[in-house]
């Protein structure tokens, strides 16, 4: 299963959940599982710490790939993919990471391995990504471009 699906299942949200609703669900889960509520038992406190870490990671990830977040960052993303060339790329499980000349990096999720192999074998990775990657897969920005 994909990372997105796992995180949605952990927080109990659907694909159509909006960012504000996601935030409310996250806050309620954090109130319920906050480690300070479990002072009577070290075992329960440790379990709550682990759960809260999972919730934080899931919320931050889902917020970064939410349609509202992507729409807000679309002008910057469009500028990067049109004006900057691909400097490097890597593939782990089903996640493709592209690093651009402007030092920004984006992760694309659920990319099939066969498509990654085609990217490796392509003569022009930039052209290949414009046709098959950029607007086909859920993505998020991994690192910020360095401001000069």
Image (spheres, grey):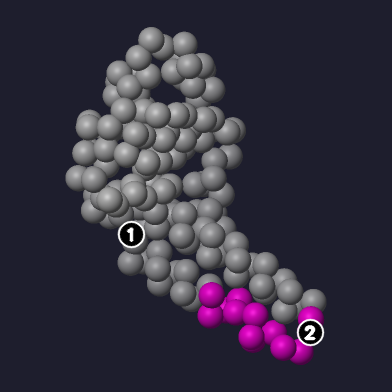
Q: CA distance from mark 1 to mark 2?
A: 36 Å
Label 2: element kind: loop
Please report the residue visible at 54 percent of the width from the left and 41 percent of the height from the top.
Answer: 2
* In the depicted structure, whether residue 74 falls above or below residue 58: above
Q: Which mark is in front, 1 or 2?
A: 2
Residue 121 % position (x, y): 47, 11
Seen as rendered, the residue at the extreme front is: 148
> How many marks can you see?
2
Q: Quick check: marks 1 and 2 in contact, CB under 8 Å? A: no
Tell me the chief SS of the magenta region: helix
Q: Is residue 34 magenta?
A: yes
Residue 25 % position (x, y): 45, 69
Please report the residue visible at 72 percent of the width from the left and 71 percent of the height from the top.
Answer: 47
* In the depicted structure, whether residue 87 falls above or below residue 28: above
* In the depicted structure, whether residue 79 falls above or below residue 67: above
Query: Looking at the rendering, which quadrant does residue 139 occupy?
Result: top left
Label 1: element kind: loop
**Label number found at residue 41:** 2
- Position of the N terminus, as image quadrant, is top right
Residue 29 % position (x, y): 53, 73
* In the depicted structure, whether residue 55 falls above or below residue 79: below
Which circle's residue, 1 or 2, is located before the other in the chain? 1
* Closest to the observer, 107 or 9: 107
Residue 98 % position (x, y): 42, 33
Q: Which residues are magenta?
A: 30-42
For label 2, count other residues whose C-alpha is less than 10 Å away and answer few (under 14), some (14-19) or many (20+): few
Please report the residue visible at 34 percent of the width from the left and 49 percent of the height from the top.
Answer: 146
Kindly tell me whether residue 139 is visible in this rendering.
no
Please report the residue visible at 49 percent of the width from the left and 21 percent of the height from the top.
Answer: 116
* Closest to the observer, 17 or 69: 69
- 2 relative to 101 in the view: left or right: right
Look at mark 1 in the image and give the residue it sits on.
18
């Amino acid at each position: 299963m994909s990372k997105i699906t796992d995180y949605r299942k952990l927080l109990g949200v659907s694909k159509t959940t909006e960012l504000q609703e996601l935030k409310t669900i996250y806050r309620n889960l954090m109130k319920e599982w906050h480690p300070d509520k479990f002072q009577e038992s070290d075992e329960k406190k440790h379990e709550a710490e682990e759960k809260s870490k999972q919730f934080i990671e899931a919320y931050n990830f889902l917020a970064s790939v939410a349609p509202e977040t992507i729409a807000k960052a679309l002008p910057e993303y469009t500028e990067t993919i049109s004006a900057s060339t691909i400097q490097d790329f890597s593939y782990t499980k089903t996640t493709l990471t592209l690093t651009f000349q402007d030092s920004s990096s984006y992760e694309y999720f659920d990319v099939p391995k066969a498509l990654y192999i085609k990217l490796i074998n392509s003569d022009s990775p930039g052209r290949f990504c414009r046709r098959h990657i950029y607007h086909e897969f859920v993505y998020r920005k991994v690192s910020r471009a360095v401001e000069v």
